[in-house]
Amino acid sequence: MKTYLELVCPAGTPAALRAAVDAGADAVYCGFQDCTNARNYPGLNFNREELQSGIAYAHARGCRVFVAVNTFARAGDFGPWQRAIDDAAALGADAVIVADLGVLDYAASTYPQLRLHLSVQAAAASALAIRFYRETFGISRVILPRVLAVEEIAALIGETNIEAEVFAFGSLGTMVEGRCYLSSYMTGRSPSMDGVCAPAEHVSYQEEGNCLVSRLGEVMINRFGPDEPAAYPTPCKGRYLVQGRPLYLFEEPMGLNVIPLLAELKAAGVTALKIEGRQRSRAYVSKVVGTFRAILDSIAQGKPLPAEAAELAVMAEGGRETFGAYVRGWR
Amino acid sequence: MSNLPKSRLTLGPILFHWPNPRRRDFYARIADEAPIDCVYLGEAVCSKRLPWFEKDLPEIAERLLRAGKEVVFSTPALITTEQEAKEVQAFIEAGKTVEINDLACLALVRGRRFVSGPLINVFHERALDVLRNHGAWRVNMPVELTAGQIATLARHHRTGETEVFAFGRQPLAISQRCYHARAHNLHKDNCQFVCGLDADGLEVSELNGRALFAINGTQTLSHGFLVLLDALAELQAAGVSHFRLSPHTLDMVEVAWIYRAVLDGTCSVEEANARLAERIAPIPFINGYLHARPGREWQPARPSA
Amino acid sequence: MAEGEFPVLLVSNALALLPAPILERAIGLLLAVLARKHPRLFRTLAAHPPCAIGIEPIDLPHRFVLRYGGALPSLIPTGTLDQPLNARVKGKLETLIGLLEGRLDSDTLFFSREIVITGDTETVLSLRNALERDSVDLFAIAMALFGPANGLVRRAALTLERHLMMTRQHLIAWHEALHASRREEASLAARCARLEAQLQEANARLAKLEARLRQRHLARETS
């Protein structure tokens, strides 16, 4: 089945998986209900039975399922990660998405037939890194960190000939992923090991006058004026004082949207587009996946882009969109 | 404590963009006066800075070696360009011992011994084995680990060396984007090396004025100083062989002597903490991660039974 | 109250005039049917530690306290929310219903300040994720209560659809307005950016000259 670009979509819950598959996903990615994946939030993710049903539902409709086991195993506690790989393999997942050296080692040596995708949490941003992971563990695909410009992506793919998946829509972090401690600095829970960045249990919002103040742990992350869109208190999206001036020092709250760059990404040799948002609602998944499906089909058939493409902007964090690092000038 | 092998003190690479005269004077004093066993030289944060001081490195290394110190060359936390990869390769081919801070370098160190730096993700035993199989003999613990996790890894790595970051502002994150430049309305491409204006990092506060981070180019550090004086004995007993002091503008020779004294038992932890607090006041001490707390917190030691 | 009038009242402003005891009875009926149709959702809610969430539809005089965890869930109308609560959710009634049914994205509504969530965020998030797993269709339930052919139910469903579409269009319009003002700023900003780039280039040249001067000065000092 030849597709213009493969559409890889988030499945935070079994209901969201069905929504994504129905909306036209080529593949969905999901995680188990524990710390082995990077969206370990209450009420999210799949138990083993739900994954089995989900895989059956997806496969019956020609859609693949990737299981994310992309956090870093903890000292003295490899069990959950080992079981996650074992169960994903046993249930017939089409690939596992992994970042940790030890988990890669276990998966590659125990299940040589199981497709390995290198998670963005491994932060492999150079040809050297990709070569290392491919030679050592036999990864088939790399999810590229969101810090490379399109020209750099083209050069990387040209040099390594690796299957590349890039983020196309959704939230984006500004730090190198899998190596960021900003959230654990404030909450004590580690994005790398626990799979939670800015976990809800440490998030609070308070109305102060007509402003909304967001906090992570005891740290004040932002104060939104009455006309400003609100945002989740992810530390890298906060507003801080630098030399007395309030400023979005790291990044402004906004969402990634690469629709105008699709042709360039395709020309750069990219294989798949990844939609971020396992923690978002069914409504989000249906809307975003459906719109991208319509857009990709239009391009494949040489037709003009559908009007709904413009409506996606509303769902972005902070109500604003960006091309992120894909276009020079971000650094 | 007398049964354990003597713990060694290391000096981490200068994380900040110090001018050359300052660097040279700093290392001269370290060579002559500091009880440091191993010195890490080089640029770990931003490869744009390396051309400024790399020609001084051979002479500094030579001086440290003559003073009986071990020398290891640190490499950048992010290897993205071919140029950066070539620079690391040049060090390795010249026979130098390197500290790697980006896993990409595992593709370059094959067959040679190397040090795995504190910016490498090694949180459990199996990952550590992969590093060992590639030649890592000294492994730095990520700063996010608890004392218990460090102990587990040190035990697993008992035939090698385990190093822990024990003093200085804690590295929290690295990015391709330069925040120092951004704070001055510039970009990484035309940064004018404004990171050189802040020798200990640029202070960043919450909107309510409370200090939170220190910015160092593309790196984000804690505002507070990690001080592990009260945990040295426990970590040493758990198998940690090296303690790293990260250079700041205060008198690092004095800091090294304070740590050496606590390790040797010639100075009490309380007295050592008090002396150090005077030197870095009003900046607070932190040690949250070691105690499974938020990293920015300070957990006073339990009173000894 | 005639049972057939209930679904229409739910979406019309006449709801504002209903006294609390009658409203309470109507809600009780609804919850009973919900429990029968969504046993897994109610089991998940029951497994939660006991909590109370204040619901504030800003276009009604009524406030509601949603309690679950430990016992059967209850949604009690009340005058004010002056009591200990784990969290509060504030927004227009049709927005809240759209949220309940999973037809509107909660994050988008939150970003645009259409809903305001304060207090224990984790509790609200768990509730949202529990509702996400079970598609709650309020009008299917109303139909189960009053029969599918009921014309009032159909009319009420159409009214709600219209409200939902208006909310979506309102969101898009708000977003457009936000960007329109930014677009005007953008052309001015483009001119400023060009001037800034020229200034930066000049600054960079100056910095290089200064650096060279400094090096020369240092070389003179150390020789």
Image: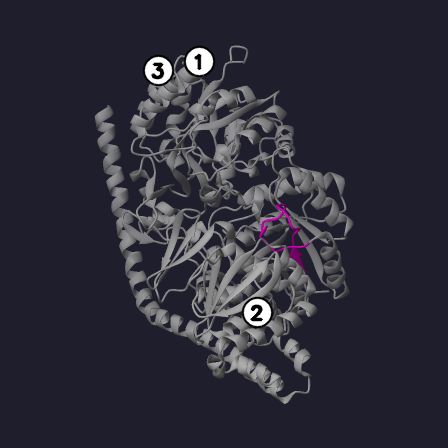
In terms of image quadrants, where is residue B222? top left
Dominant SS in magenta: loop
Q: In the shown orientation, is residue A13 left or right of residue A223?
A: right
Q: Are marks 2 and 1 on the same chain?
A: no
Precedes in sequence: disc 1 or disc 3: 3
Residue at image coords 32%, 68%: C185
Residue B286 position within the rendered picture, expressed as x and y whole percent measured from the top left: 41, 34
Q: Chain of mark 1?
A: B
Write down the residue under mark 1.
B264
x, y percent for residue B59: 38, 21
**Crowd rating for badge 2 (residues with CA inside 10 Å; few <14, some 14–19, many 20+):** some
Frontmost of labels 2 and 3 is 2
Q: Which mark is residue A127?
A: none
Q: Is residue A32 magenta?
A: yes
Q: Which residues are magenta?
A: A26-46
Question: Looking at the image, is A61 positioned above or below residue B187?
Answer: below
Q: Residue furthest front?
A: C21
Q: Position of residue B242 (x, y in %)?
A: 50, 22
Of A119 and A302, the residue lying toward us = A119
Please identify the quarter of the rendering in which residue B20 is found: top left
Q: Nearer the viewer, residue A11 or B31?
A: A11
Residue at 38 percent across and 55 percent down: it is A222
Residue under label 3: B33
Examine the structure image and report whether residue B83 is included in the region drawn in magenta: no
Q: Amino acid at mark 2?
A: Leu
Q: Mark 3 is on which residue type?
A: Glu
Tag nearer the camera, 1 or 3: 1
Query: Does the image show residue A25?
Result: no
Q: Nearer the viewer, residue B12 or A288?
A: A288
Question: Can you identify the residue that label 2 sits on?
Answer: C100
At mark 2, the secondary structure is helix
Which chain's residue wears label 2?
A: C
